[in-house]
Image (cartoon, grey):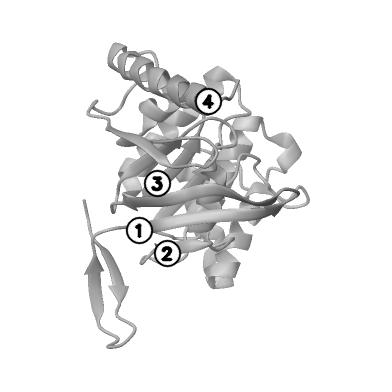
Amino acid sequence: MTNTLTKDQATGRTTTAGYAARIEHVSKSFAGPAGRQLVLDDITLDVAPGEFVTLLGASGCGKSTLLNLVAGLDKPSVGSIATPGGRPALMFQEHALFPWLTAGKNIELALRLRGVAKTERRTEAERLLDLVRLGGAYRKRVHELSGGMRQRVALARALAQDSQLLLMDEPFAALDAITRDVLHDELTRIWRETQLSVLFVTHNVREAVRLAERVVLLSSRPGRIAREWTVGIEQPRRIEDAAVAELSVEITEELRGEIRRHGQH
């Protein structure tokens, strides 16, 4: 793994951090009709530079809330979060592309916000489309793209932010099984080529094992880290591989136990 470079604010010197994200004793509560509701409770987790981590848990366990906190879209009620490589890139379940822009212009918008010169944006957008294997799609409108192609453009737009940490909130959940499997392959390839750190939220156990180097299971109501697994299965993997299936069974049993303990159905 590579280390993450960051600047010491007091000295201005560039130093090396051994993590892409550090979550320390983070709790989050929201106001509700019955008072404040604790959603996340004392979460401590590091994502190493270049590591692929999946956050797994039942619906409502706080996975997306935690991702939003790491993205800086909200603040913890307690605890701290550090991303020394800068602001993370975030990819949602919905592609959130602007329909009045072409695929290329959607990517160029992210480049413009990053401060890339106008003369360089077209070339960089086309490079990113090539990276997600959509070469030639620069001029295509959103309505001309399939669901899988839209998610590829959304991924390219996230990569355009040039962040060292990519946050993904169930980005393939709405896709059919075959398209999702193809995009698993593509994401694995891109992650290995770019050496990005990835924090990926899912409720699909097979998907978590298929993609990750480490699987983190959250309990429910409030979300706590219940257990972690290091996935020692060589990449590239297939979702139907025996080793993937075997570990998925073990994690599923643990997830079912968490659901039973917290009275969910």
User: Residue tagged by mark 4?
Assistant: 180
Foreground: disc 2 or disc 4? 2
Q: Hey, which quadrant is residue 192 in on the image? A: top left
Depth order, front residue of 127/202: 202
> Measured from the top left, where is residue 7 in percent x and y?
31, 78
Q: Give the residue drawn at x 38%, y 31%.
A: 211
Residue appearing at x 37%, y 26% in the figure: 210
Secondary structure under the numbered disc 4 in the rendered image: helix
Residue denoted by label 1: 22
The residue mark sitting in front, 3 or 4, is 3
User: Residue 27 placed where, x, y %?
Assistant: 49, 55
- Is 199 left or right of 65, judged from the image as shown? left
Q: Nearer the viewer, residue 47 or 94?
A: 47
Q: Is residue 225 depicted above or below 247 in this figure?
A: below
Q: Please state the horizontal and vertical placement of residue 137, each as a whole percent of the image.
A: 61, 42
- Residue identified by numbered label 2: 80
- Circles 2 and 3: CB atoms closer than 8 Å: no
Image point 44% across, 60% down: which residue?
162
Q: Which residue is mark 3?
A: 198
Q: Amino acid at mark 2?
A: Ser
| CA separation in Å, label 3 and label 1 | 13 Å
Q: Secondary structure at mark 1?
A: strand
